Image (cartoon, rainbow, N blue to C red):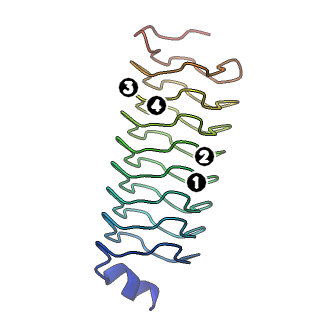
């Protein structure tokens, strides 16, 4: 199947468990409510795709273009999203427990209600991201850029913020961080 055929294909409700879609062009694809457990989608173009309510647990999405992708209510537990571009991606109510998000770009993302407990967010760009009510319990934030991020009501228990950049961030209690 060519990239153009993949983009046009009706992939809703398809079981793509352990699929190999490396370097695929799925820009704008409709993949809502699929099963992509342990799939390898690394280096793929998935911009503007819809993965709402999809199970991507354990999937490899490293180096993928995920700009403006819809991951609302998606299971990304233990997924590898390192070095991805998630600019303006919707991750509202997604679950990323134990996910690898090292050095990815989440600037401007909607992360309200997201579960990132025990995830690795080292070096991640979260500038101006909305994390209201998010669970960041025991998350690694070494050198993460959280400038101007909205952390109102966020669970930061067990998180070391010493090496994170927080200038202008709205803290869980509503105060503005001034470094």
**Regarding mark 4 in the picture, which secondary structure is present there?**
loop
Q: Mark 4 near mark 2, Cβ–Cβ under 8 Å?
A: no
Q: Earlier in the sequence, mark 4 or mark 1?
A: 1
Label 4 to label 1: alpha-carbon separation: 20 Å
**Regarding mark 3 in the picture, which secondary structure is present there?**
loop
| Picture layout, residue 115 above or below residue 159 | below
**Regarding mark 1 in the picture, which secondary structure is present there?**
loop
| Picture layout, residue 109 above or below residue 54 | above
Q: Earlier in the sequence, mark 3 or mark 4?
A: 4
Q: Mark 3 near mark 4, Cβ–Cβ under 8 Å?
A: no
Q: Which residue position is annotated with label 4? A: 128
- x, y percent for residue 33: 31, 63
Q: Mark 2 near mark 1, Cβ–Cβ under 8 Å?
A: yes
Quadrant assignment, res 84 = bottom right
Mark 2, residues whose alpha carbon is within 10 Å: few (<14), some, or many (≥20)?
A: many
Quick one: 96 or 27, which is closer to the camera? 96
Residue at figure coordinates x 47%, y 21% from the top left? 155
Which mark, by number, is residue 101? 2
Label 2 to label 3: alpha-carbon separation: 19 Å
Q: Which residue position is annotated with label 1? A: 81
Q: Earlier in the sequence, mark 4 or mark 2?
A: 2
């Amino acid at each position: 199947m060519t990239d153009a055929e993949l983009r046009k294909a009706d992939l809703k409700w398809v079981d793509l468990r352990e699929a190999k879609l490396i370097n695929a062009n799925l820009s704008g694809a409709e993949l809502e409510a699929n099963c992509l457990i342990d799939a390898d989608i690394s280096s793929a173009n998935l911009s503007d795709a819809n993965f709402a309510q999809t199970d991507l647990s354990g999937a490899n999405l490293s180096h993928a273009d995920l700009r403006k992708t819809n991951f609302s209510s998606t299971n990304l537990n233990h997924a590898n999203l390192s070095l991805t571009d998630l600019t303006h991606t919707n991750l509202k109510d997604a679950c990323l427990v134990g996910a690898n998000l090292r050095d990815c770009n989440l600037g401007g993302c909607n992360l309200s209600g997201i579960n990132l407990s025990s995830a690795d967010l080292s070096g991640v760009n979260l500038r101006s991201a909305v994390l209201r009510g998010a669970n960041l319990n025991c998350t690694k934030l070494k050198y993460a850029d959280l400038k101007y991020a909205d952390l109102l009501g966020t669970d930061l228990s067990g998180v070391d913020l010493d090496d994170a950049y927080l200038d202008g961030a709205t803290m869980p209690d509503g105060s503005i961080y001034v470094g």
